[in-house]
Amino acid sequence: MSWSFSAVGKPDAVQRAIEASSNNKSTGQSLDEWNAAKPALLALVGANQGNVVRLTANGSASVEVRPTKTDSEGSPVSTERVRTSGSCTCTLESLYGFVE
């Protein structure tokens, strides 16, 4: 599954947009991946106080469902989701020359 996010503005406004975003109402695995990426994105934007910034980020991961318990015939009784791979790409630019 995958997610993406972009915003342009003062760092405080971009951080509020990250916090408020459920990433286009993603659900399930995509929403889980987005929520896992949020703290890192917030930290990166927060390190750029005073500048106008453009943040573009996206990510994806693969998850495999594996049995954790089987019955006497070997059929799964319970399972767990295990992330098998993933990636995240983020571009954070400081923008200059803006007037207010």
Image (spheres, rainbow, N blue to C red):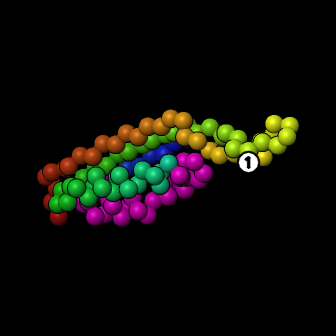
Main secondary structure found in the magenta portion:
helix
Name of the residue lying farthest toward the right: 73
Task: Answer above or below: position of 21 versus 69.
Answer: below
Where residue 83 appears, as percent x and y from the top left, is: 55, 40
Residue at the disc numbered 1: 78
Q: Secondary structure at mark 1?
A: strand
Residue positioned 30% across, 42% down in the render: 91
Indicate left or right for 23 with 67 as reference.
Answer: left
* Quadrant that contains the C terminus: bottom left
Residue positioned 24% across, 46% down in the render: 93
For the image, the number of numbered tags is: 1
Residue 52 shows up from this direction: no
Magenta stretch contains residue 75 = no
Where residue 87 appears, as percent x and y from the top left, is: 44, 37
Where residue 16 appears, as percent x and y from the top left, is: 36, 64
Indicate left or right for 31 with 16 as reference.
Answer: right
Q: Amino acid at mark 1?
A: Ser
Residue positioned 48% across, 45% down in the render: 3
Between 67 and 56, the one lying in front of the other is 67
Residue 81 is drawn in which quadrant? top right
* Quadrant that contains the N terminus: top right
Residue positioned 47% across, 55% down in the render: 35
Residue 65 shows up from this direction: yes
Magenta stretch contains residue 27 = yes
Indicate left or right for 30 with 75 as reference.
Answer: left
**Magenta region:** 8-32
Indicate left or right for 72 with 62 as reference.
Answer: right
Sort mark 1 into few (<14), some (14-19) or many (20+) by Cα contacts within 10 Å: few
Residue 99 is drawn in which quadrant? bottom left
